Image (spheres, grey):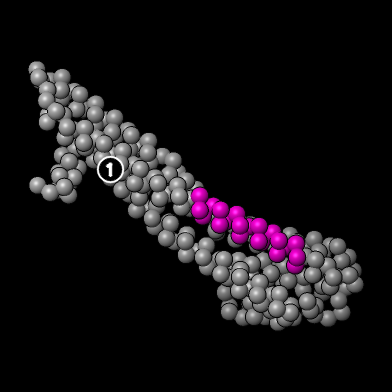
């Protein structure tokens, strides 16, 4: 009997509660890896998109031309480009309203960029809480399965007059599998959560910095109020 067959036999021979625990942990592990892979792609695209947009933005181009390039795709821009689009669109709208003070224009642009940033952060942080939950609860779920399996093994020992190691070893082994499965589900989730939470925080700092820098640029165009389309 090979090791893999022994492992399968232990799982199939486990009690219903232990099998249910193992099923829950396997499902949690599959969901965790699905989130990890999807979140990895999302954060990578956000970072690369911010790099590309910053290169274009600080390349000395006209704001109107950049705005036209950002919006010509027909889909709502995301990331740093989304912040720029929201702020500049609000700036153009407010610039057409007569009698509006420059400070009011700037405050309106800031609010628009803050709303766009909150939406972007909500998108980037999506499912991170699920990773944290899987990482924190899976070991305890596995421990519950282990305790239940060992309890059943001790009950089986109590029903016989003499117990040997060969008699209790399978029950204890199947119980310990639950703990191993709990760690198998928890460790990747915890590592991914810490890594991705750090990346989200770094992106948020970049968005905050860009909002301040872009607001300063818009402030220069609002004092005095521009006569035509603003440039950078």
- Give the residue drawn at x 17%, y 49%: 4
Q: Is residue 149 above or below residue 122?
A: above
Q: Residue at x 74, y 79 (%)?
A: 60
Q: Which residues are magenta?
A: 194-214
In the image, residue 119 lies at what x, y percent? 61, 59
Question: Does 37 sit left or right of 216 as displayed?
Answer: left
Residue at the spot x=15%, y=22% of the render?
A: 157
Judge left or right: residue 131 versus residue 10.
right
Disc 1 packing (10 Å; few <14; some 14–19; many ≥20): many
Q: Residue at x 40, y 46 (%)?
A: 187
Q: Position of residue 108 (x, y in %)?
A: 78, 62
- For the C terminus, give its image quadrant: bottom right
Using residue 107 as the reference point, say whether residue 130 is left or right of it.
left
Residue 227, placed above or below residue 213: below
Q: Is residue 90 visible?
A: no
The image quadrant of residue 59 is bottom right
Please give the residue where the numbered disc 1 appears in the rendered image: 22
Residue closest to the eye, 181 or 126: 181
**24 relative to 52, above or below:** above
């Amino acid at each position: 009997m090979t090791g893999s067959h022994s492992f399968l036999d232990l799982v199939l021979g486990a009690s219903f509660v232990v099998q249910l625990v193992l099923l829950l942990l396997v499902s949690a592990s599959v969901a965790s890896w699905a989130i990890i892979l999807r979140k990895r792609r999302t954060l990578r695209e956000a970072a690369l998109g911010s790099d590309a947009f910053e290169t274009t933005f600080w390349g000395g181009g006209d704001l109107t031309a950049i705005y036209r390039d950002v919006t010509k795709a027909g889909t709502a821009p995301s990331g740093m480009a989304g912040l720029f689009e929201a702020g500049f669109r609000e700036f153009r709208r407010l610039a057409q309203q007569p009698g509006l003070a420059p400070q009011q224009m700037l405050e309106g642009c800031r609010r628009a960029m803050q709303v766009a940033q909150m939406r972007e952060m909500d998108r980037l942080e999506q499912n991170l809480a699920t990773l944290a939950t899987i990482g924190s609860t899976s070991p305890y779920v596995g421990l519950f399965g282990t305790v239940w399996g060992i309890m059943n093994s001790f009950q089986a020992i109590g029903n016989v007059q003499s117990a040997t190691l060969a008699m209790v070893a399978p029950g204890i082994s199947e119980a310990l599998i639950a703990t191993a499965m709990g760690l198998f589900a928890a460790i990747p989730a915890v590592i991914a959560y810490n890594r991705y939470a750090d990346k989200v925080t770094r992106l948020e700092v970049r968005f905050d910095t860009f909002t301040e820098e872009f607001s300063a640029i818009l402030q220069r165009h609002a004092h005095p109020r521009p006569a035509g389309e603003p440039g950078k």
